[in-house]
Amino acid sequence: MSQPARAITPSHPQLEQAKEHLRALIGFDTVSKNSNRALIDYMAAYLGQLGAEITLLPDATGQKVNLVARFGPEEQPGIVLSGHTDVVPADEDTWVTPPFAMDERDGRLYGRGACDMKGFAACVMAAAPAIADADLQRPLYLCFSYDEEIGCLGAPDIARHLAALPVPPEFAIIGEPSNMKLVTGQKGKIAMRAVVTGTSGHSSFSPSHVNAVEYAGQILGLITERAARYESEGPFDAEFTVPHATLLATMISGGVATNVTPEHCSFTFELRSIGENDPEGEMATLIESTAEINAEMQARTPGCGIEFQRIFAYPAMNDARNSAGFRALAGLMPAYGGKVSYGSEGGVFEQIGGIPSVIVGPGSIDQAHKPNEFVEISQIESCLEFLGGLTARLSAA
């Protein structure tokens, strides 16, 4: 007996355009150490041809550039669609195909940045012709930044630019990979470096030296102790993937030989905070707790001690569900996905620009920063549907 024909689900009409844009975007090697200028020029030219008002916000060198493209009337409070253009390095030798050339197989699109987060940018570009043709009653701001991966360095200029507009946007959607679920919170981060200076000499005379590695170990003990208190005492927010702040050392370097007392040791550490924390105050308290260690080192030999250096920081993104912007779009939002421990530019928009933010984007964070990074084609289609619904809502506002 013959089998009934299997129904074929038609693909989204903008899917092929999204694939082609993603192919082009992945082809730009925008690892954070490199310029993103060529990619931004590509996006700006395409969106400008569709009628968007283009604003470029370069850094002091001109090699890193933010893009703000507006569709719709500037005299109304609008919506931001935000993404970053930089990616992490792709130096692993386990890539099956070249990381900066998109490959399609098994229902997935592979390449560095495919999910984090050029997939979202490709969807926005594929949706842009429909956005341009729509009778928008409120504007859409398409914002793409540089150097998010190394501390959200570009986003503050975008947030300040938007906040200074005669009518600033009232809400932002960050396209970080969330499996197209609604994420309403993101941790903030402070990244620090501790530089410990002691004295060196032959290790057989170690009691007369100031051992930088051993004193660094004492500081690391304080960090570990404080991290344990976050885990046991909170504050807690059960909606986060890790429901409390985290504090840990991440890299360390020190010493020159097995028979030399180490004169220098440095290590990096980070605090990831939730909205209930006071990250600046808590970091200051941690540093103050090393005062006795520092004083002991200086008492033994003047010039020894500890120096703390800030590498970068970005704020937490708080829950925007009570904001007017969210309430206006609540019916469009996908299923709830909780809050996440990774960073995004949402906290920057909220703190600097006064723009409440959420995260909704294609792909899984589990695939980010790994060899053979990919985004499911079904996620791209879901994102295109979401952007279509948003365009329709702003046209009927």
Image (tube, rainbow, N blue to C red):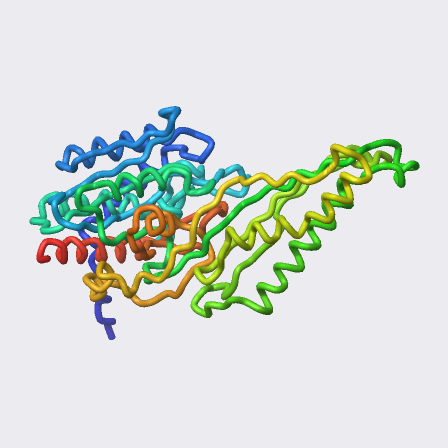
Number of marks drawn: 0
Q: Residue at x 44, y 37 (%)?
A: 98
Residue 206 locus on image (x, y percent): 88, 39
Q: Quadrant of the N terminus?
A: bottom left
Q: Quadrant of the C terminus?
A: bottom left
Nearest the camera: 184 or 285? 285
Q: Residue at x 18, y 41 (%)?
A: 70
The furthest residue to the bottom: 1
Left or right: residue 150 versus residue 290 is left
Residue 139 locus on image (x, y percent): 15, 47
The image quadrant that residue 185 belongs to is bottom left
Q: Residue at x 33, y 54 (%)?
A: 362
Residue 159 locus on image (x, y percent): 31, 43
The furthest residue to the right: 204
Nearest the camera: 222 or 1? 222
Nearest the camera: 149 or 379? 149
Can residue 173 be seen at all in this image of the molecule? yes
The image quadrant that residue 34 belongs to is top left
Nearest the camera: 334 or 67? 67
Left or right: residue 111 versus residue 303 is left
Q: Residue at x 63, y 63 (%)?
A: 228
Can residue 105 be seen at all in this image of the molecule? no
- Position of 19 relative to 328 (above/below): above
Left or right: residue 37 versus residue 211 is left
The image quadrant that residue 180 belongs to is bottom left
The furthest residue to the top: 61
